[in-house]
Structures are given as C-alpha cells and as structure tokens.
Image (cartoon, grey):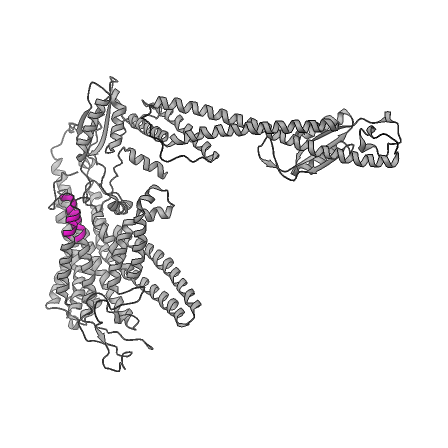
Amino acid sequence: MAKHGGGCIPPMDLFRSEAMHLVQLIVPIESAHLTVSYLGDIGLIQFKDLNAEKSPFQRTYASQIKRCGEMTRKLRFFNDQMSKAGITRSSKSVARADMHLEDLEAKLGELEAELIEVNANNEKLQHGYSELTEYKLVLQKAGEFFKDAQISASARQKEISPDLPAESLATPLLKDHESSHDLSKQVRLGFVTGLVPKEKAMAFERIIFRATRGNVLLRQVALEEAVVDPTSGQKVQKNIFVVFFSGERLKSKIVKISEAFAVNRYPFTEDMGKQTQMITEVSGRLSELKMTIEAGLQHRGTLLRRIGEQYEQWNQVVHKEKSIYHILNMLSIDVTKKCLVAEGWSPKYATKKIQNALQQAAIDSSSQVGTIFRVLHTKKLPPTYFRTNKFTESFQAIVDAYGVAKYQEANPGVFTVVTFPFLFAVMFGDWGHGICLLLATLYIISKEKKFSGQKLGDIMEMAFGGRYVILLMSIFSIYTGLIYNEFFSVPFALFGPSAYACRDASCSDSTTVGLVKVRDTYPFGVDPSWHGTRSELPFLNSLKMKMSILLGVAQMNLGIMLSFFNALYFRNFLNIWFQFIPQMIFLNGLFGYLSLLIVAKWYTGSKADLYHIMIYMFLSPTDDLGENQLFENQKTVQLVLLLLSLIAVPWMLLPKPYILKARHKTRHQDESYALLDDNDDSLHGEADRDSDDQEFEFSEVFVHQLIHTIEFVLGAVSNTASYLRLWALSLAHSELSAVFYEKVLLLAWGYNNVIILIVGIIVFIFATAGVLLVMETLSAFLHALRLHWVEFQNKFYEGDGYKFRPFSFALLNNEDESS
Amino acid sequence: MGFMLTTLIFIVIGMIACLCTRICCNKGPSANLFHLTLVTTATVCCWMMWAIVYLAQMNPLIVPILSEGE
C-alpha cells in the first residue's frame, strides 16, 4: 500500500474511512476480565484471534464458557416454563447490584432444581387426580348398569315367581331361564369394569368375543365428555364397559387383553351400600387432591413470577460474561502465565479513550502493574470504519450492500445521500404521490422511538430502517413533480400563465397545426398546455431522453473525478496520467460533446439532427455538415475530438503495464539476497509481506489493464444508454397515473351517479396506492440503486474492504434482539 | 423570468441553505464540509433539472396540437 497524504481537499466527514492502527495490549492476568469488560463498554476495538490454531477445547477459558453455556440452558428452560405457564417476563428488570458469576450460577442451579421438583410433583398429582376421576365415573355408570339390570330382573322375577324374596337376586342378569333351576347350581360370575378409549372400543369387543368364544357378556356405555387419560395427560373419549365371565382362565385372558389395549381397570363391588360408600370416599379424595394441585400450581406461579422479574438482567449478565470469555480466549497467554497479549484494530481517534479505560481497569482490579498499550506497524489492510449517525447510516448501508469500501478510498456514500433520492425522483416525478410518500414517512419518523424498541415484521423493518432515505426521496419527488407539472397526472399553472395560446381567436386550427408560443417560456417546469395534446409524447420523450443523457454524463464525470481524488490521496500518479486523463478525454470527447450539442440545439433552436451528427462523426468525419451545423468550425472540432478519443484508447491501455514493469525491475534490480524481516510485526512474527512487491507477472498486469480499458470504452456507450431508464420509468409512471385518473376517476365522474362515483374513488385510491405508491416506488428505487452501483461506482470504486466489527456490548445486544 | 435570473436565484437559495445548515448544525470543520457538500450537490441537481426543462422549452421545434374533442 503506497503511502498517502492528504488530497487537495481538506478532510471531510464520511468521505474516507477512519484512520485505524493495529494496537497491542499486554494485560496482567488479574485485571484481564475487568479490562475486557471496560473495553466492551467503549466498543472501539476489533480483537484479532491470536489462538486461531487452537480448537475451542484447548483454549484457556473453555471451562468458563461451558459454565456460561450451562447457565444459558437453564435460562432457556426457565423461559420455556414461563411461556407454558403464560407468564410474561418484564422487559425492565429490577436493577440489583452487579452479580458475580458464581453467585448467579448457584442461584440458577437451585431455582432449576426447585422448578423441576415442583413440576414432577405436579405431574404425579395430576396422574392421581385423573385416575380418581375415571374411577368415580366407573362407579357411577357401572352402578347404573347393575341397578337397571336388577330392576328389570326383579320385574321379571315378579312375573315368573312373585313369592320369591327379592334379596336372592345376586346375579340377576342370568336369571331369565335358570329361575327354575336349583339355587345351588348357580354359576359364579366374575366381572371386570373399566374404561376403554372410544376408537378402540369396537376392536376390543371383537377380540374379547373371539378370544372367549362368545362366552362372555360385554356391556358398553359411552361417556359424553372426554376424560383426561392418566398416562398421556390428554383428553380422550372413552367408553365404560362391564365384562361378565365365568372361570379363572377367561378372567386371565380378559385381563391380558385389557392390558394390551391400555385399558384402565377399576375394582367394583356388587353391594349397593358399598358402592355409595365408595363414591363418597372417592369424591372426598378428589376434592382434596384438587386443592393440593391448585396449591402446587400457585407455588409454581409465584416461583416463575420471581424468576420473570429478574430474567432479563440475568440473561444480559450471562451473555456479557460469555462474550468476555470468548474475547479472553482470543488473547494469547504469555509463557510466564502472568499476562495476556491482545492485538486488535482500533481507530486512531479512540486512543485516549482506550487508554483511560485500561487505567480504570487496572485501578479497579487493584493490580500492581498497568496495561501496556503499544501501536504496531503493519502492512496489512485495516478494516473500514465509517462513523455514521442515524441519518447517514441507511445511505451507507446502501453502498455497503454492494461492497464495503477499501480502507480509506473515497466513499460514494457522501454523494449517494443526495443523488440517490434525486435519481429516484426523476423516475417518480409527481408531486401528489410525493406528498403521500412524505406523509407516510413523516408518520414513521414521528413514531421512531416507539418502533425502535419493538420487534417489527420483515417489511416494516425495512421500511423503518430506510425512513430517512424515503424522506429525502419524497421531498425530491415533490420537486420533480412540480417540474414535470404532474399532480396525480393533472397539470396546474402554478407559476404563471402558460406560454402557448391559439393562433387566432377562434382556435380553429388548434387541432391541426397547433398552438403558438406567445409569451416567455413557462418559468418553472413543463408548460401545462402540453398535457393531453397529441404532440405531448414526442415533446416529452425528446425532453426526458436528453435529460437522462445529460444527468448520466454528469454523474459519470463525477465518478471519474472521484477516481482522480483517490489517485491523488494514495499518491498513485501513474493512475492520474495514464488512467484518469485518457478516461476524461474519451468520455467527454464523445458524450460530453453530445451533451454540448444537446444544449446548443436547445439554445439556438436549430433543426439539426443529433443522431445524424453523432453517427456521421464516426462514419465520414470529413463530410460537410450542411444543415446540421450548430456552431462555427464544427467540423474541425469534431475531427479533433475524434482523434483525441482514438488516441485515448491506447493511452489507457499500453503505458501503464510497461511502466509498472520498469518500476519493478529498478526496485529489485540489485537483489541477489533475500531481505531480512526487520518489521516490528506482531509477537508471533507473521512474515506477512506485501506479496505483490515480490511477484510481478507482466502478462497478468497487461491483461488486467486490457480488461479495464475495454470495460471503460464499451461501458462508456452502454452506461450512457443505461441512463435512458430514467426516461423510461418516468414515462411509465406518468402514463399509469394518467390512465388511473382518466379512465377511473373521470369516467366515474361522468356518470353523475353518487354510488358509481364512490366506487370509482375507492378503486382510484387502491390503484394509486398499490400500483403507483408501492410498486413504482420499489421499481424506481431498484433502478436508481442499479444506476449507482453499476454506472456510477464502476468508474472509481473498488469496494473490497472489510467492515470494522468492534467488540461492543451494545452491538451484541442488538444482534441478540434481531436473532 | 429569464434563464440567467432564475439561475441566480438558485445560487442565492443554495447559499442561504448552506448558511442555515452552518448555523443550526455546526459540528466541527469536517462535518461542516460534509454538510456543505450535501447542500451543494442538492442545489446543483435541482438547478440542472430545472435548467434542462427550461432550455428545452425556450425555442420549441414542435408545439402543442390539441386532440379532438377538447
């Protein structure tokens, strides 16, 4: 990198990136943590990773990072629990005194254990509760089975043998045809009661039937509401069933099948008295359990609320500590284990601040030795740092999106602040739409404080981030709208009367030959008489195309001038003589001349055909110009310009590679030995030499220069033509606007019907907002962006630097919020 | 109003704008130069646009021809 001094202009904010230097800090171990913490508060050093070869587990502070990771996990667990319980954490936590990491760790550990225990207890209680609920339901429903069966059987019994006592109806269901038999021949029946999920009920019944060969009786009743299943904790539709069987083998089969179907079985007594007793007992236990569960939930709620109050603060502390340890891991530890060495980039203006912080840290950690602060000299490329405020930040982001500026090269952002909204406005020009945009963006800016704290959706986030860009865009749009004289495509005579009037009083030939210019030119903008005429488009097209060319040539010249300032700043005089000058000659000889012709034609009102002039300047330059003559000696001027442009091409191409080759030869002419490394580089002795100092491939340099020349020469034509998009988009905008106005609003007005008028107005508003205000804005934004990134910046911008990312707690917080 | 006169008006407005920005946000020489650049660029852009449209209408080669039924 060649040495650089000041350019011929005094220093300007944001024009070149901040001067950076590589600093080395030697920090005693006891003050390391505090030093890094204070440096993080300032946020102006980008630390270099001096332990890059080591794996994360070999580093000095790996265990601390693991502890921080554990704490983050615990905090995440708390967050989950809080969101499940529906407790929101307060964003502004109670500010307690600074916590130490060990205390915080212990506290988090105990809270986690407590929370886990409470949760486990809660689960167990819930399990018991749902089981009891199911049992109660079984008791009720199965009791009904037996009662019904008893009533019907006793009814039958009364029919058949009315003098038999009612108490002998132990198993009433099978008494129908066996009533004649002896009581001793009664078969003992067993039964199983329980609940089966509704979906499995049919399969259950079928399998039991098949397995027992139909020797059982199954009764089912569906429950109306779903019960909470004890094992899964979900609400399931269940059926209550009773299975009657005889014999032990059937019982074991039925039990096994129930287990396979995950059926919950509950014991049941036939005795009526005992049944009611069981029901009251179960109800009692249920209400007790409910109270216990509620108490448990309340306890958990208070616990979580306490956590919620301090959550944010703890979160921040843990993040901060984790980042500090990450940085500490990047420092290399000295052999004597008494101090750490840090290297990093920092802006030169911040030196005093950093030194103060280091002193403060040394005092606060009561260490005997202070930190040593040293500036290293290196040939490596420093990072690029622009000090932007909230206004210039979005414009700089637009430039950085294409490529971050190389260290200290001219920043196109300075001009982009004005030219980007301006070119947008040239394509958008309508002061009615501009006012709508302005109102919208003023609203967003007025709510700035509120929006910056909130989390917005993606689209809103982009609109909010670019609020100042849109503000300038809308202001310029109002200006260009006044110049194009379009208010929702309607012209107004705001600046005086129109310059055109009919030729005679009857206006008879206004539709054939047209109006005539009777007064001075309309003082500001396009004359209102043009709108709606037949010759409007030919006039406006010619005007806008020529305007695009003029604006384009102006911006490209600005780009080449910036490359001149770059060359001056970096003392690269080769670039000035053999790149800047031929480029200026070529571009201005051809397209600057075209611009001159345009202005001359307008000024003199001549009927010369500019296409013809330009084309025949190349095809037959020595021909007579005839009626295309705009000024004296035009032919000579054109010949000279043509010659100069032709010379400029080899001037750009040939000398530079040969001169570079000659320079390289003189520099390394007497070298028969290798140079010693006497640079005061970093402790690790990285031999990072300027590689292009040693190697020089002539073919590579020549091809590079050839590509550069071809790109410029061809680009001169294509880039100039590219600026015609300014014309194209502005035409599209005004045509769309005119269509919506005439074909929607005026049409609706013509019907003299209120409803149609209202519908027409609504359609007009939606069409304007959707197509013109949203789609056209995005479209013009995109094209203005392209004009800047390609046509403007490829004249001077290298854009291969890297951004300055300092270690700063404020930046970390922003990253956390956005992730 | 004349081309030169309005150009003069633009220059005057530009200078007034520079003075205003110097008065309300005076933050050191490099920041002042930056603001000056912005104001100058804006004035030049606006003037160029006006001048182009004005020049194009000074000696017109075509005139408005009204469409039928107007």
**Magenta stretch contains residue B22:** yes
Q: Position of residue A13 (x, y in %)?
A: 18, 44
**Magenta stretch contains residue A309:** no
Q: Is residue A805 above or below residue A422?
A: above
Of A236 and B23, nearer the camera is B23
Residue A457 sits in quarter: top left
Can residue A715 be seen in this snapshot? yes
Q: Position of residue A579 (x, y in %)?
A: 16, 49
Q: Position of residue A148 (x, y in %)?
A: 76, 36
Q: Position of residue A750 (x, y in %)?
A: 39, 72
Of A777 and A22, nearer the camera is A777
Q: Is residue A685 above or below residue B60?
A: above
The magenta region covers B18-39
Of A306 and A54, nearer the camera is A306
Q: Is residue A636 above or below residue A415?
A: below
Horizontal arrangement in the rendering, residue A314 relative to residue A594 (left or right):
right
Residue B46 sits in quarter: bottom left
Main SS of the magenta segment?
helix
Q: Is residue A129 above or below residue A601?
A: above
